[in-house]
């Protein structure tokens, strides 16, 4: 079973503009996502899916610099962007990544992939019942299913790529994977300046390589001051673009 990793990335962010190219320990946020996805050992090919907007030329340049393929497609139709990547490449499975999650854990990606392959399911996500920190969730979908929903998904479902599947779970074989202990109180995604302060502190402490969640969570337990930095940040609702 071949797995294609697709990282969606844009420069236009309402709460923290240009966040995907901010530097963490000398590497861009996008490069850290790329390296963690590759380190999982389950991604056969990796593509960054960005837009045709002029502002995203910088993402294309970064992809060239770090040696990863880049595809340019619609601005707001992110599902269409993913399908455009699939029109150029063969795969059995798509693993979806977002470029604002620089702390993703390669071991969690690998474990989720093992469960997904063994199950034969249409779709797997760790975010259906949250136990992982925001920013470490993993999702994967069979390529034919992603193609199938092209004719079904409208409005915000085009933006969130897979949301049509898990909001119509009666029509698909959906697995919600949970991992213990419950660390859902931690926010490790990058969307605001306060998120940045926390993530920068983590990278300053652990260095260049991806850090496993167990080690990271243990350290953060000893640093409640850091956890509080972005504890107030609210995640955007599903219907928000």
Image (tube, rainbow, N blue to C red):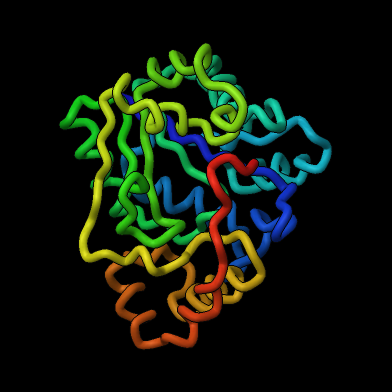
| Direction from residue 57 to residue 220 in the image, left or right | left
Instruction: Check the image and name the residue furthest to the right.
Output: 54
Of 148 and 90, the residue lying toward us: 148
Residue 132 higher or lower than 5, as above or below: below
Locate residue 120: give its quadrant: top left
**Percent x, y for residue 217?**
33, 73
Q: Quadrant of the N terminus?
A: top left
Percent of width and height locating residue 151 = 52, 12
Q: How many marks?
A: 0
Between 172 and 19, which is closer to the camera in this rendering? 172
Residue 187 horizontal/vertical position (percent) = 46, 66
Q: Give the image quarter of residue 240.
A: top right
- Residue visible at 68% across and 44% down in the picture: 10
Q: Could you tell me which residue is drawn at 79 percent across and 35 percent down?
A: 53
> Where on the picture, by quarter, is residue 220?
bottom left
Depicted 215 relative to depicted 164: above or below: below
Residue sitting at x 46%, y 78%: 227
The quadrant of the picture occupied by the C terminus is top right
Task: Establish if 7 lies above or below 198.
Answer: above
Residue name at image x 48 percent, y 43 percent: 97
Residue 151 to residue 225: above or below: above
Q: Is residue 201 left or right of residue 44?
A: right
Which residue is the extreme one toward the left?
118
């Amino acid at each position: 079973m071949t797995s294609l990793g697709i990282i969606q990335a844009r420069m236009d962010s309402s709460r923290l503009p240009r966040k995907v190219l901010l530097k963490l320990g000398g590497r861009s946020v996008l490069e850290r996502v790329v390296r963690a996805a590759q380190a999982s050992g389950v991604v056969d090919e990796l593509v960054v899916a960005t837009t045709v907007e002029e502002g995203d030329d910088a993402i294309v340049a970064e992809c060239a610099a770090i040696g990863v393929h880049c595809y340019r497609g619609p601005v707001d139709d992110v599902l269409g962007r993913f399908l455009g990547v699939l029109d150029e490449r063969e795969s059995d499975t798509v693993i979806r990544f977002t470029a604002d999650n620089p702390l993703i854990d390669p071991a969690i990606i690998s474990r989720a992939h093992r469960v997904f392959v063994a199950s034969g399911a249409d779709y797997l996500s760790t975010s259906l019942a949250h136990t992982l920190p925001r920013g470490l969730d993993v999702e994967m979908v069979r390529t034919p299913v992603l193609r199938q929903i092209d004719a079904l998904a409208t409005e915000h479902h085009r933006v969130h790529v897979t949301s049509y599947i898990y909001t119509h779970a009666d029509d698909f074989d959906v697995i919600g994977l949970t991992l213990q202990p419950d660390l859902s109180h931690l926010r490790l995604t990058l969307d605001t300046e306060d998120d940045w302060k926390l993530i920068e502190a983590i990278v300053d402490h652990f260095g260049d390589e991806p850090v496993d969640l167990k080690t990271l969570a243990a350290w953060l337990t000893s640093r409640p001051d850091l956890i509080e930095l972005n504890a107030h940040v609210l995640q955007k609702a599903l219907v928000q673009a």
